[in-house]
Amino acid sequence: MASCQNQPARVPAIDLTNLDPTAAPEVDFYQYATGGWQEKNPLKPEFSRYGSFDMLRENNEIRINELFSEMLDSKAAKGSVEQKIADLYRLGLDSTRLNAEGAAPIRPALDEIFAIADRRGLTEVIGKLHGSVANPFFGVGVQSDLMNSDMNALYISQSGLGMGTRDYYLDEENAAIREAYKEYLKKVFRLSGVAEEELAEAAEGVMRVETELARSQWSNVALRNVAARYNPMSREEFEKTYDAVDWATYYKAMGVGDFDRIIVATPSAVAGANEVLKNAPLADLRYYLASQYINSAASFLSDDFHAASFDFFGKAMTGTPEPRARWKRAMSVPNGTLSEAVGEIYVARYFPESDKERMTQLVRNLQTALGEHIDALEWMSDETKARAREKLAAFTVKIGYPDTWKDYSSLDIDPEKSYWENIVNANIWYTAENLGKLGKPVDKDEWHMSPQTVNAYYNPTTNEICFPAAILQPPFYNSTADDAVNYGAIGVVIGHEM
């Protein structure tokens, strides 16, 4: 008889201790299905929700932080990714320097905003903000053309609400949140050096602008209508229709290259922003642009700025009692800004090539099984089966990490500059990278999620499914319990597009 000593331990697909058998499922199914999990995993004060993926992300944060801590102790060569990661991490940890600098890192930009003398001066500032830190009034960017997924196109869509979505501004039930938002605005304007006698009017001015923007913006439900969000226009027609912006100045300030057409994702919202730019008092527009800049910067400034931001966006809006530990906040910045550089180091430590090969073969097996399942379906016509088979054969499966890593050599991280200035420079770098794709073929080998991310995604425009390394390795993944989950994911993807 063959030995079973080397067989991997089998893990139950369902852990029955996560259930609460004392609850009647027909009365409270949520308590029945999750009561055991909730008891074993009480909600931590830095979370507004806590599930299995949050647990996995926490475990992964510890791994990544260990990598970064090792880099702090080494002497990395200037310009290397190790130097950039370590210096960016160190800047985020240095509360003494951040508190000493206060609002100084943001004052030059705020001075430029408050110096806007007429509406003609708005465009250049909007372009600079779009290219670096925020998207007031609307957002412009490049992504694959929904009607020609092989080519990249220029899009414009609604944006610019400090509280995120229109419902916070328009629904009566959110009145208390609106009042808390105005108090937050007064706090950060005060910290930024705005005179005390201006604070109330500054907050009200921001609310007036954002409320008008909200009136024409699409709801989250309306945004689900992908077909309605595809409204291509010629460049000439676009510039004539939305005439509050000096577009030539905007393109130059933001770095938009030449193009013949633009896709307007939310026409009524862009039209609404156009009217606000034409008709809102200039003082309100200045306060609004300043608030957009401050909101983006607050998490990268002193403890006072971060506390003000957390008190509103964390406590008031999501009910989170406590902020994340500083090391977690600091760690998340290089992990996001230099995501593939971190990913390359991460997989070298935790995800060997043999694991990638094993998981690639596993997914191929799942695709084969899914093909056999399609063939056996009695309710599906032969024509539909052929289409499903065609789509299955065209799947791009991305496992673990990209074959070619992103090049960060032109992204400069300078520890002599402030934390915020480095963040701005990184944002400018990413904006230029995105706009550089305009009019070019879509790179279907590009990854849109880092290898160290505990998640997965499906991209319908390129028919690709991506499983990053962090979701495919022990203890996050086991081939006995999770094969069915991934098989289900692929099946849903195939079925969704047929």
Image (cartoon, rainbow, N blue to C red):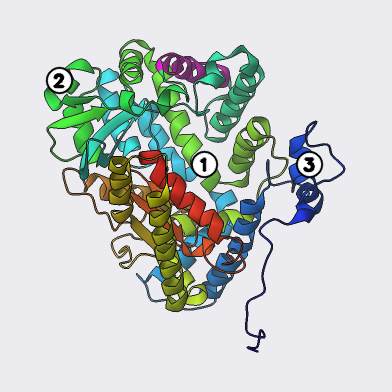
In the depicted view, which residue is nearer to us: 299 or 7?
Answer: 7
Q: Is residue 344 visible?
A: no
Calculate the distance from the C-alpha at mark 1 to the C-alpha at mark 3: 50 Å
**Is 60 displayed left or right of 493 in the figure?**
right
In the displayed structure image, the side of residue 399 where residue 71 appears, left or right:
right
Q: What are the residue bounds of the magenta stretch? A: 197-216
- In the rendered structure, does residue 210 fall within the stretch colored magenta? yes
- Residue at image position (30%, 65%) is 409
The quadrant of the picture occupied by the C terminus is top left
The furthest residue to the right: 22
Which secondary structure lies at badge 1? loop
Q: Which residue is mark 2?
A: 237
User: Could you tell me which secondary element the residue under label 2 belongs to?
Assistant: helix
Q: Residues within 10 Å of mark 1 (few under 14, many from 20)?
A: many
Identify the image quadrant of the N terminus: bottom right
Residue pointed to by mark 3: 32
Mark 3 to mark 2: distance in Å? Answer: 57 Å
Image coordinates of residue 378 in percent, x first then y, are: 42, 43
Q: Nearer the viewer, residue 174 or 440?
A: 440
Q: Which residue is mark 1?
A: 103
Q: Earlier in the sequence, mark 1 or mark 2?
A: 1
Q: Earlier in the sequence, mark 3 or mark 2?
A: 3
**Residue 375, relative to residue 243: is it above or below?**
below
